[in-house]
Image: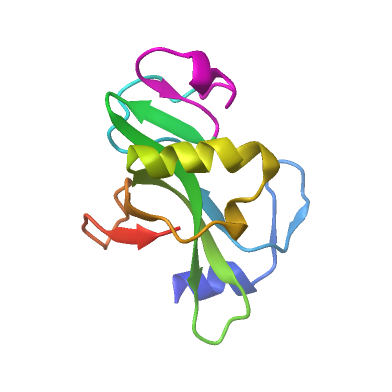
Amino acid sequence: MRWIDLLTRERTCPCCNTPLRDLLYLAYSAPEEWDGDNTSQDNDTLHSAKGDILTNDFCRILDRHFVRTVMLLPFHDIEGCLILGIWVHLDKPRFDQFYETYPSGKQGSMEMQFGWIANIIPGYPGPHACCI
């Protein structure tokens, strides 16, 4: 019921008094395994960087590769969804394919990619397989 209340009642930003009419968006800043600074770098640095790195949309930790994705969680009797920004672990070939197509924005036309949710979602202990 709290989610429905957050999504349906009128709210204003406490800082600027702007009406908040959009759905609630939540996002993880990095995969759970990330042990470094959560300040992300530009996506272009991933190609030339050595070692572990966190960019705006990609992460590499040792030999593990992650992409930032969006999970839409629908609510019963409400038009919209809760939008949850999560990280997904992909194997290296799928990660490379995703990374190479990223600048063109063609991920939507790619075949489904199998991965694992790389964040802990409260109330849903993992690990959880997913398709992106």
Range shown magenta:
40-56
Q: Please report the residue visible at 69 percent of the width from the left and 42 percent of the height from the top.
A: 104
Whether residue 131 is situated above or below residue 47 in the rendered picture = below
Query: Relative to 67, is 44 on the left or the right?
Result: right
> Secondary structure of the magenta portion, mostly?
loop
Q: Position of residue 14 (x, y in %)?
A: 67, 46
Q: Give the image's coloring scheme.
A: rainbow
Q: Please report the residue visible at 22 percent of the width from the left and 54 percent of the height from the top.
A: 127
Tally of numbered tags: 0
Residue farthest bottom in this picture: 77
Q: In which quarter of the image is residue 34?
A: top left
Whether residue 49 is situated above or below residue 75 in the rendered picture = above
Q: Where is residue 124 in the image (x, y as percent from the top left)?
A: 26, 62
Please check the rendered image and state whether residue 115 is part of the magenta-colored stretch, yes or no.
no
Q: Position of residue 35 (x, y in %)?
A: 30, 24
Q: Is residue 27 visible?
A: no
Please check the rendered image and state whether residue 48 is part of the magenta-colored stretch, yes or no.
yes
In what quadrant of the picture does the N terminus appear? bottom left
Q: Is residue 111 visible?
A: yes
Whether residue 112 is situated above or below residue 18 in the rendered picture = below
Q: Please report the residue visible at 58 percent of the width from the left and 51 percent of the height from the top.
A: 107
Whether residue 36 is situated above or below residue 92 in the rendered picture = above
Residue situated in front as seen by the camera: 95 or 57: 95
Query: Relative to 1, is 18 on the left or the right?
Result: right
